[in-house]
Amino acid sequence: MFKTDRQIIIALGLLTAVFCIFFLTYDAKGQWGFILGFRGVKIFALVLIAVAIAVSSILFHTITHNRIITPAIMGFDALYVFIQTSLLFFLGTIDFINLDSMFKYLLNIAIMVTLFLSLFHWLFLRANRSIFLLALTGIIIGIFFRNLSYFIFRLLDPNMFAVLQGELFSSFNAVETDLLNVSAVIIGLCLVPVFAMRYKLDILALGRDKAIALGINYKPNVFALLAIIAILVSVSTALVGPITFFGLLVSNLAYLIVKNQNHINLLIVACLIAICALVGGQFIFEKLIGLQGTLNIVIECLGGITFIWILLRTHKR
């Protein structure tokens, strides 16, 4: 249908604009200024989440040379669950509920970024280990924090556990609006070096040996990308909770439809697909069907199916 990536990007951009317009204006009754402002904030939140997840997934695939795994495999979701569980256990229900959302948001990001940057620096730079050992270590850390969380679960009373479940359930509908400006600044600062490294990304995708042969300073560049991935995933997780398969879904759709597999095209297309999926999905489920908490379940289900499909296709090859 589309002969060039430019046409694909334009088509996705138009589709994104259509979904945004429908989301802003559909069944709008009352004061337009209030409605557009309220719904506009929701779209802004969805765009930030979509960009963070799409960019981090593409970057992670580039440095690992594996399109099946996502940054979630490093254990970010397990660490997030452990942080929330520990806060609730030590503070108690009342203090946990009354905890300032900005403080909790920044605390989550600070702990996740600090831990994983320390891991990246220790294993990848100082110990001179491969990126694959780094991913394996991330899986083990995820299992460790997950089991610690399960242990604390058993110590919580039913009321505390109910509060925790509400906190851990990922929802695109319950984003704290006062966190969006800080999130936008953080994500924007991460996108600047990604854009500056767009040509280096194409070379890094060739593999470690070829990248070094072509003059790329491999370890510092990969560490910088790992740092960006850690920040983006931490921001998206702190905003909406753990999301496992959404990045896998949008990145592989981008790989499927982009003709010239350079990273600037892949990143733009993946971001547009992610925005279309979130804004369009939220419009369909919230405005048309009237189901407000369903989108994340559907996305994770589709992402899981995509994961199985990729595994089966790879096995046949």
Image (cartoon, helix red, strand yellow):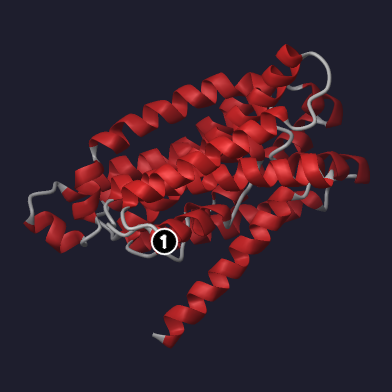
Most foreground residue, 155 or 82: 82
Most foreground residue, 287 or 294: 287
Task: Identify the residue position indicated by label 1 in the image.
Answer: 1
Q: Left or right of 76: which side holds 155? A: right
**Mark 1 secondary-structure assignment:** loop
Most foreground residue, 134 or 40: 40
Badge 1 amino acid: Met
Q: What is the quadrant of residue 100 in the picture?
A: top right
Q: What is the quadrant of residue 160 in the picture?
A: top right
Q: x and y percent of residue 217 in the render?
A: 14, 46
Q: Residue at x 37, y 33 (%)?
A: 191
> Does 3 appear above or below 276?
below
> Does 86 appear above or below 77?
above
Q: x and y percent of residue 94 in the render?
A: 86, 26
Q: x and y percent of residue 96 in the render?
A: 78, 28
> Does 113 appear above or below 182?
below
Residue 238 visible somewhere in the drawing: no
Q: x and y percent of residue 151 in the render?
A: 74, 54
Q: Residue at x 53, y 53 (%)?
A: 72
Q: Residue at x 53, y 46 (%)?
A: 274
Q: Residue at x 41, y 43 (%)?
A: 10
Looking at the rendering, in which quadrant would you find the N terminus? Answer: bottom left
